[in-house]
Amino acid sequence: MPVPSCIFTTAIRNGEITKLGTCIFHSHNRNRCCSLPPHSLKTLHALLKTASPMTLGSGRSIKDNPLWYIKTQSYRTTSQQYYNLTPPQVNSILKANEYRFKVPEFDGKNVSSILGFDSSQLPANAPIEDRRSVATCLQTRGMLFGVFDGHAGCACAQAVSERLFYYIAVSLLPHETLLEIENAVENGRAILPILQWHKHPNDYFSKEASKLYFNSLRTYWQELIDLNTGEHPDTREALINAFKRLDNDISLEAQVGDPNSFLNYWVLRVAFSGATACVAHIDGADIQVANTGDGRAVLGVQEEDGSWTAVTLSNDHNAQNEDEIKRIRSQHPKNEEKTVVKQDRLLGLLMPFRAFGDVKFKWSIELQKMVLESGPDQLNENEHTKFIPPNYHTPPYLTAKPEVIHHSLRPQDKFLVLGTDGLWETMHRQEVVRVVGEYLTGVHLQQPISVGGYKVTLGQMQGLLMERRARISSVFEDQNAATHLIRHAVGNNEFGVVDHERLCKMLSLPEELARMYRDDITIIVVQFNSHVIGAQSKPGGGD
């Protein structure tokens, strides 16, 4: 766990966006997006140097994967070795990026429906392309939680994780507060921050781009002031407008460029890479989930008999969603019907059908060529950025507009899981809710062992019982629900039980092979205060 430092509240001065917010943890990692976080893959490699070698081919679930046969033939010609990790080493890897925060029940203004949250990350890419963000809205109400999954690099996910919550917070502010902020900035006066960030030290901000980001955000709130309707902002509309506006600013900044060579390259990298986003705004008993892409939000509901039910609060925007396919086809001519979605991908290339950035699927061919020709050489030499998607006739093909789903919390709604697709590719939502629910209640230590219809020998049953005994010991005990879920996502066997041998094999895969077998995993588990929710749901119990 990171060591907490005192909360700081710095006013806006010199036009830097980082001074709009507070943070309860200082970040010591100042490296940019594409450098390795100090406690992720470096930790893994350091541990592997001291571990004893073993062969990876014995695990059934890995060996049965066709990718395994394809890859091992090439890697065995190199000096790559696979290692057996001890339980403390496994724990060190799994817990390197975990974070936990307990929300005060009363903040001086409102009673919180949130007890706290756990978050964690496990990289597969080097560096990790996922990002996460959590913040408390200080000038309005509620908390924001988000997971972001980058592709074609981590630049876009990094930018969105830093900026989106500011756009949402500004969209939620009443007209009077916007005027107060603008007048303070105009006159160089200090103002109170609008967000309090809850960050792991590895979750950093890009200092170099802070002034650029601030100027774009200020232009946005100036336009909101000019467009004043006199009505209190609607949360759903605020989320949609914030997503769309940030994506528009990402595109505009790349087109305009910047005289600073680093920033000029950075804004282009952000625009030409992409990111999905799954964000939850929780205020009292109201949850609004805004989703763009294939991240997912799932509610854990405890039934009267103690069992757990998963309620999905988002829809995946990919080829498995028929409504998404119809939406995209309806926005393009009839003669593109067979090419706009091909092999379950947008234009045969992109898996998510909604995303930030990815201007290769939004700009005209002429605009792409013009920006690249005037851009830095290192970007123009990149084959990915120069490549024009096939059958590219009527852009834009991609949008960052989120789908927003509202839910009113009930006392039986115990927690919310936000996860990037790396989690949902390995575990069904019902299994995710069961694992988290039993972890939070401690039930997993008392329930009879289920083998799911499999025929097991006495030896296998003994192994399952020994595994349960080991889980009770402090060596395997997780203090973080998100870390516990990652342990299951990576290490579960066919019985739904964590197999330490399988887990250590998966964690010791070399970088080149790890990404072929699984994706980055980022998880936030938000736990609710059922007593507060129950009181608020009674007549006259709300504010």
Image: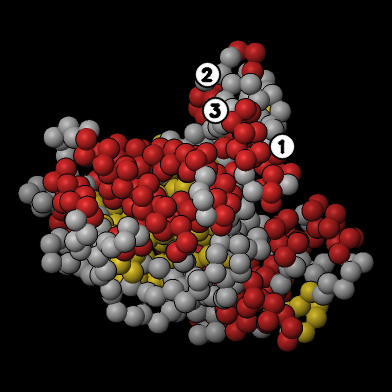
Which residue does the numbered mark 3 point to in the structure image? 396
Q: In what element is the residue under mark 1? A: loop
Give the residue type at disc 3. Answer: Pro
* Residue drawn at point x = 44 percent, y = 38 percent: 248
Q: Nearer the viewer, residue 451 or 512?
A: 512
The residue furthest right is 77
Sequence-first disc among 3 and 1: 1
Indicate left or right for 461 with 111 as reference. right
Residue 504 lies, with reference to residue 217, above or below; the image says: below
How crowded is the residue under tag 1: few (<14 C-alpha within 10 Å), some, or many (20+)? few
Residue 482 lies, with reference to residue 360, above or below; the image says: below
Residue 481 lies, with reference to residue 155, above or below; the image says: below
Sequence-first disc among 3 and 2: 2
Give the residue type at disc 2. Answer: Ser
Which residue does the numbered mark 1 point to in the structure image? 387
Residue 534 visible somewhere in the drawing: no
Q: How many marks?
A: 3
Tell me whether circle 3 and circle 2 mark residues in contact (CB < 8 Å). no
The residue furthest top is 334
Quarter of image, res 495: bottom right
Which numbered circle lies on residue 145?
A: none
- Give residue 519's position: percent from left, percent from top: 63, 56
* Residue drawn at point x = 43 percent, y = 41 percent: 249
Q: Nearer the viewer, mark 3 or mark 2?
A: 3
Which residue does the numbered mark 2 point to in the structure image? 330
Instruction: Measure the alpha-carbon separation of dots 3 and 2.
Output: 13 Å
